[in-house]
Image (spheres, grey):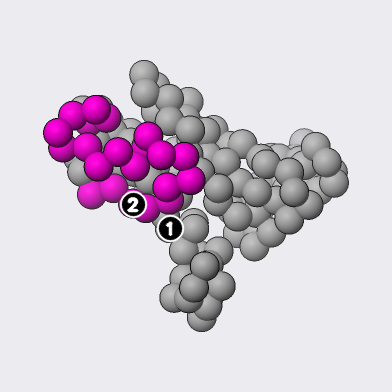
Amino acid sequence: MAFKSCSFCRREWETLDEFARDPECRPLGLVVHFKDAYRSLLLFNHSCGTTLAVRADDFRDRMPPLEGPLLAGSDGCHEHCLRFGDLEPCDQPCRNAPLRRLMADMSRRHTPGDGNGNGKR
């Protein structure tokens, strides 16, 4: 059984690695679940036009634990998680910060330029 399949074009990705490295799947945004960060959704646009959702829990082995205080709504919050499409990393000690860094890293890998994310969007 495939890790993920596109409901429109029927493209299948056998593993999370294959999906995460596919240049045709561009990070779109993060929908944060404020009570259980592992239930947050990472959204990607596939080249066929479909939006694909992957639960944060699927990326558990690729980031630090989603622990610590939730800073959303506090003075220490930069409100990245409140703005859909904001793919900037967060440097605060918030439980959602590892998700933000993961999405920012994936976004840089998908940015046209020199292959290292050093280019224009």
Determine if residue 69 is in view.
Answer: yes
Taking 68 as reference, is 47 above or below it? below
The residue that label 2 is drawn on is 89
Q: Place residue 35 in its image quadrant.
A: top left
The picture places residue 3, in percent across and down from the top left corner, at 69, 40
State which region is magenta: 71-91
What residue occupies the far left of the structure in this picture? 75
Residue 17 visible somewhere in the drawing? no
Instruction: Report whether 94 appears left or right of 102.
Output: left
Q: Quadrant of the N terminus?
A: top right
Task: State the image coordinates of residue 46 (x, y, percent, origin top left).
Answer: 70, 51
Q: Residue at x 44, y 75 (%)?
A: 118
Q: Does the magenta stretch include residue 45?
A: no
Label 2, secondary structure: give it. loop
Give the residue number, with chain letter if any, for mark 1. Answer: 105
What residue do we see at 77% from left, 42% from top? 6
For badge 1, the amino acid type reads Asp
Given the image, on which type of amino acid does mark 2 rest? Pro
Local secondary structure at mark 1: helix
Residues packed near mark 1 inside 10 Å, few (<14), some (14 to 19) or many (20 plus) = some
Q: Which image quarter: residue 68?
A: top left
Q: Do the residues labelled 2 and 1 touch (CB within 8 Å)?
A: yes
Q: Nearer the viewer, residue 37 or 2?
A: 37
Q: Which residue lies furthest to the top in this view?
A: 35
Closest to the camera, between mark 2 and mark 1, is 2
Q: Position of residue 104 (x, y in %)?
A: 42, 54
